[in-house]
Amino acid sequence: EPEVTQTPSHQVTQMGQEVILRCVPISNHLYFYWYRQILGQKVEFLVSFYNNEISEKSEIFDDQFSVERPDGSNFTLKIRSTKLEDSAMYFCASSEPGGYSSGANVLTFGAGSRLTVL
Amino acid sequence: AQSVTQLGSHVSVSEGALVLLRCNYSSSVPPYLFWYVQYPNQGLQLLLKYTSAATLVKGINGFEAEFKKSETSFHLTKPSAHMSDAAEYFCAVRLTNFGNEKLTFGTGTRLTIIP
């Protein structure tokens, strides 16, 4: 069964350092997402990406964050200067485009990248 | 705008007993609704989805959920709990208008199965 793969599974970094989390979405999917889950809290939407641009972003996704699809297969989340509060599990997801006429296409999630900021 | 509320952050049931996890939604347009499960140290796995067809939706591992518009609810049930059902369960809502694929999750319910 096709799956979304994420690397690294766990990264520890110092506050102020840049971090890049990588994702390989399912090959025929066109929508890509990043979510995060701070320990013990709910899964929060960060950003969605379609047609090589951000389609929606949350308040959390400030100027410290950026996303990129550099080579047609990878989808990356960059945190420019990490803060302690960025410590969380980051989930990548992908989906086919849905919509009312075609029904809800399901987001398939990766296993997550745990980021620990010290 | 859309949101989901999951009542009960922790639910414990005995093995073999009925599982009932509650989810209520709020949505400005007819919603799509989902239940995801997260096993320890794993990602989110889809259990089932409601997409405006049948109101009673069957998913994997014997789970099902019923969409009740009048109650704005989408509760998850399983007739007989198994030890392997111990996990965190998330209800999520998505708007049906094209181009808005974002899922909004509830706070999750941790299900514990008592032997």
Image: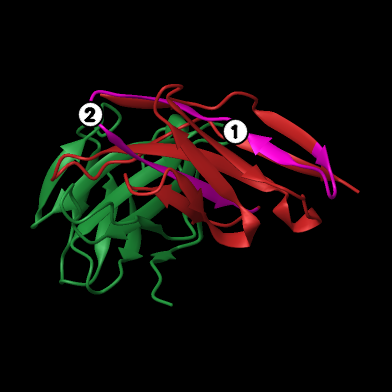
Taking the magenta stretch, the answer to whether it contains residue B38 is yes
Residue pointed to by mark 1:
A40
Q: Where is residue A96 in the image (x, y as percent from the top left)?
A: 23, 61
Tag count = 2
The chain coloured green carries which letter?
A: A
> What is the display colour for chain B?
red
B38 left or right of A18? right
**Image spot of residue B114 (x, y percent):** 87, 43
A46 or B69: nearer the viewer:
B69
Secondary element at image label 1: loop
Q: Distance between the residues labelled 2 and 1?
A: 30 Å
- The main secondary structure of the magenta stretch is strand
* Residue B25 visible in rendering: yes
User: Chain under label 2?
Assistant: B
For image coordinates 52% across by 54% down, the residue present is B58
Mark 2, residue position: B29
Q: What element carries label 2?
A: loop
The verdict on residue B46 being magenta is no
Q: Which chain carries label 1?
A: A
Near-viewer residue (A20 or B35): B35
Residue at 53 percent of width and 43 percent of height: B65
Color scheme of the displayed model: by chain
Asked if badge 2 and badge 1 are on a common chain, one would say: no
**What amino acid does circle 2 point to?**
Val
